[in-house]
Each structure stands twice: as C-alpha cells, then as structure tokens.
Image (cartoon, grey):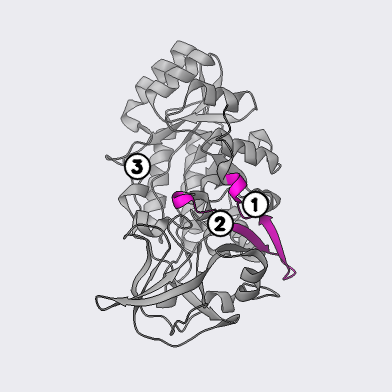
Amino acid sequence: MAYSFTQENAFYGSTDPQKLLEKYGSPLYVYNEEILRKRCREMKSLVAYEHFSADYSTKANANLHLLKIVREEGLEADAMSPGEIEVLLAAGFAPEKILFVCNNVSADEMAFAVERGVTVSVDSLSQLVTFGKRFPGHKVAVRLNTGHGAGHHEFVVTAGKKTKFGINDDKVDRIQAIVRQYDLHICGINQHIGSLFMDEDTYVQGAKILFDTAMQFPELEFVDMGGGFGTPYHKQEGEKTLDLAPFRRRLDAVIEDFVSAYGRRIKVKSEPGRYIVAECCALLGQVYSIKENGGVTYVGTDLGFNVLQRVVMYGAHHDLEVYREGKLMTGKGTPVTVVGNICESGDKLAENRELPEIRLDDVIGVMDAGAYGYSMASTYNNRLRPAEVLICADGSDRLIRRRETFADLMRGFDVE
C-alpha cells in the first residue's frame, strides 16, 4: 500500500481515526470539507458556456450539512423523491434551482413538486399523460433515452435497450401529441446514460445525440446532458482522478454548435453526483476478530453491508487503509478477506486483499465512501446507522448527523 489518499490530502485535519472513533463511535462516516468544495468547483467550471449549471444529484448523498456546502459553491440540484426535495429546500436551495427527475411516481408526488415551484421531469409517456391530466397548461421536462448507455455495472446503466429509464427518442411524435392534448409546454429535456465512466468519449457522444434530439423541441429552457462522471476507486493501484480537460475542450465545441443551430443560448446542465462526494469521505470501522477458516484469513469488522452496500450490490472495489493508535500502517501482510457483522455469507468488504498486518482493535478506513454510502445504509439486522462527521476547513471536526439510537429503531411501532 504505497499510496495513501488520506495522507496525501491531510484528510483527518487536526485529529486522527482513533480519536474520531473514541469521540463519535464506530462505524463512522468522515467527510472532508476542502475536498468536497474542490470537487464542486471543478464540476461548476466543467465548460466555459455562460449558461451552464452543474446540478448535484442528491441521491449520491443527501446529508443536510453537505448539501448546504454544495449550495454555497453555486451548484443546483436534482431530486428523485419528495424527501430529497424537502431536504434540498431545508438546505436553502431555491425551488427554481431544483429539478425533480422522477421515475414511476404518483400524481401526488408530482403535485408535491409543482406546489413548491419545482420543475418536474417525467420519464415515460404514461407519466406525461398523468402530469397533463393533473396540470394541463403547465410546463414540464421529459427524460429521454437516446439509446446510448454506459456504466460500470448493469444496475447503473441508465440508457440503451435494457433499462427502465426514459422515453425512447423515436417517440418524439408521441410526446408532442400528448403535449398538444393537454396544452403542455416542454421546458427541458434530460438524459442519464450511466455511471462511473473515466473518459470523455461516451459522455460527449451522448451529449451530441441529445442535442440533435433537442432540435425537435422549440420551447426549451434547458438541456440536461446527465452525469456519471467517475471516481478513481483504485488509487492504490495507480488509478488517476478523472481528467476534465478533454471534457471541457470537446463539450465547449458541442454546446456552441448546438446553441448556434437552435437559435437561442438556452441553459445547459450536467448532473454530477458521485464525482462531487465520493472522494470527500472515508468510512471508519473497528477490527473485532481475526480467524482462519478453510485456508482463508477473515478479518471481522463492524463494517457490514448495512453500512456500505456498494460492494455486495455491485461487486464494487474500495481501497482500504489500516490504522493503529491513530497512525497509518504500511507494508503488506498475508492476504485477508475483510468481512462485516451481518448474518449473511456475502457480507464481504474485500476478498483476498493484501493489506498491512492487521491486529485486533485496529481501525479500517474505507476510501471514497461518500457516494452511495450512507445514502444506501440500512438498519438490516436492526443495526443502527452510524454518525457522520465533517472535518472542517480549519481542521476541526464537527458532528453533522448523530448516530441512531434504539429509540429511533422503535419509532413508528406505536400505532395503537
């Protein structure tokens, strides 16, 4: 383990992993404010076009305090549910800075957004009809499937032939017929091709296709190119952070060609989620057992998949760091399989991973855990969700979500 992301970035500020667990308990999500702000600024300046906005995809991480930082940095936001709209409004986002990109929702959920001044984007013809019946004469956006998809796992490919998302772009005439029937106004079109790409080709090609389709909608206020910008989860193997320069160079040209042909310099958006929050977080947990079974050395921790689901859901990789008495351990020991405390054989954080020699009570740090970490955490096995802590720009640490209690677990059962 020659490379340490936390050392390279002075990640823990004025404290260390051991002190953080002693203060806030284990497991623990730890976020670094400076890294978060840096990623926001990088994505906000993705292109030179003057009417560009980066809309943070809230589903990646919806912590209220992190959202406030994202808003302070000038990003707008996408929401997938009324709950995400609610927390965005609480974080200070203006309704016109939020896009409700919904999927298979009720008319009441659409109304929740409309009544708060939030633009709704529907992603099927039937949902467009539902919206038209409830809000005739209103403006609405539509999510298109241009047939161009990508992603690191089939579950996160969100365009192409085998996905539940979007209206196929060969059905534009059907969209327009429904629009005429209910006197709707298509104010925007958007897409999302998938997640975790590490070069610009797929994204730029998808943007070109979407811009071509946009020419069929004369009333647009915006075109949303989507997100999916990747994070280097294999830093210890030399993987580098996504190079945004080729994106900027090629997208600038594509956007200028589009607005010139369209005749109006309308707004252009992107939807970064993972890129904004993944690298600003390390998930800390404790080693409670070490044993050998069938020739495999198992390192038992409190980092079950109730805390971090990405590994068991997607086969995802996260670099791991080992700390002892607050200090980073180096070198390599015998390959180990790091597991959690959930009653499932699949509860594995890493298999056959070469790590520094591990002892009881060591601390394991899971890198790049900010995206789809806490947001996908659960109370499976009636485990309590962990606290979240922010390492502030001045190096101090601040609690930004308390650890759940048994009272939280029991809430909702008193129904008599």
Which label was assigned to residue 70?
Answer: 1
- Closest to the observer, 312 or 231: 312
Q: Nearer the viewer, residue 7 or 244?
A: 7
Is 404 part of what is drawn in magenta? yes
- The image shows residue 137 at horizontal and vertical percentages of 55, 14
* Residue at the disc numbered 2: 276
Instruction: Determine the residue positioned at 48% across, 53% down.
Output: 372
Q: Amino acid at mark 3?
A: Ala
In the rendered view, would you say 209 is above or below 298? above
Instruction: Give the mark nearest the N terminus, 1 or 2.
Output: 1
Q: Which residues are magenta?
A: 380-408
> Which residue is identified by label 3?
159
Secondary structure beneath label 2: helix
- Examine the image and state in which quarter residue 20 appears: bottom right
Q: Are marks 1 and 2 in contact (CB under 8 Å)?
A: yes
Q: Nearer the viewer, residue 22 or 170?
A: 22
Q: Earlier in the sequence, mark 3 or mark 1?
A: 1
User: At numbered mark 1, what does the secondary structure look like: helix, strand or loop?
Assistant: helix
Q: Which mark is residue 182?
A: none
Residue found farthest to the front: 416
Q: Amino acid at mark 2?
A: Ile
192 relative to 200, above or below: above
Whole-Å distance between the Cαs marked 1 and 2?
Answer: 9 Å
Q: Describe residue 137's horizontal placement relative to residue 95 as left or right.
A: left
Classify 145 as above or below 115: below
For marks 3 and 1, give the CA distance. Answer: 27 Å
Crowd rating for badge 3 (residues with CA inside 10 Å; few <14, some 14–19, many 20+): many
